[in-house]
Image (cartoon, helix red, strand yellow):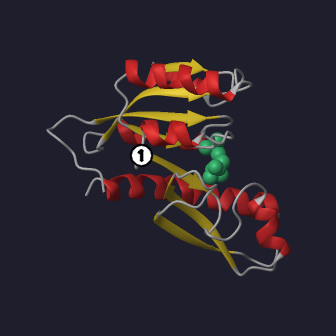
Amino acid sequence: MIKLIGPEKVKTAVFISGVGSNLKNLINFSSKKKSPINIKLVVSNKENAKGLKHANQSKIKKVIINFKTQKKAEKKTLYFLKKNKIELICLAGFMKILSKNFLKRFKGKIINIHPSLLPKYKGLNTHKKALENNEKFSGCTVHYVTSKLDSGKIILQKKVKIKKNDTENSLKKKILKEEHALYIKAINKIFN
Ligand code: GRF
């Protein structure tokens, strides 16, 4: 749990690499009076990440960091986080693995959304793996980020039923919808 000090919202950065539907959802949420977070910064490792348009539309500062050299990239990222007084990081489809050193600086302050019922199906292609294993359910998980991939403490999960005719794409769509609701619930949970 993260303690709120004073009436100010928690300055938050969202890290993305792609479409950014979770970013869009978090921006909407953060604009609500009752939201404990205020999104101050969007970090993308991809110059052409579609999700950057949501930062533009909402006039949220954005930085594009080339992660080719991880150490340099993290140093630069930390500089911008500090400059914007960021207190919480929400990973939302961010496709880079942050180093131990980086995580240490934001211990207990980085959360992620993952499209499976962790600890099942860490990493990529979660929907494909769930279908191949004839799972009856899949879902999504919001968890704290640690140096072990998709293994930090779970904050909340949502189960989604897999139907016989589900494809990777239909499952992805169904789960993504639930991800949006879950991320908000999880953020509310860590501040309560
Ligand atoms: C989501 O499924 C998220 O769980 C995973 O990457 C996807 C990102 O989607 N980590 P979007 O860019 O937020 O639309």
Residue, x 20% and y 34% (percent of image)? Answer: 8
Q: Identify the image quadrant of the N terminus.
A: bottom left
Residue at the extreme front of the image, as rendered: 101
List x then y, in percent, for residue 68.
74, 25
Q: Quadrant of the C terminus?
A: bottom left
Q: Depth check: give the residue in front, 165 or 6.
A: 6
The amino acid on which the numbered mark 1 sits, given as a three-letter code, is: Lys
The answer to whether residue 95 of the structure is visible from this angle is yes
Position of 190 with respect to 92 (left or right) is left
Left or right of residue 151, residue 165 in this image: right
Can residue 60 be spotted in the picture?
Answer: no
Left or right of 128? Residue 31 is left
Q: Is residue 68 above or below residue 186?
A: above
Q: Is residue 113 above or below residue 41?
A: below
Secondary element type, mark 1: loop
Q: Residues within 10 Å of mark 1 (few under 14, many from 20)?
A: some
Q: Nearer the viewer, residue 11 or 160?
A: 11
Residue at the location (43% across, 37% down)?
105
Identified at 40% across, 58% down, the residue is: 185
Q: Residue at x 60, y 24 (%)?
A: 53
Q: 186 left or right of 45?
A: left
What residue would you read off at disc 1? 107
Residue 173 sits above or below residue 102 on the image: below
Residue 99 picture quarter: top right
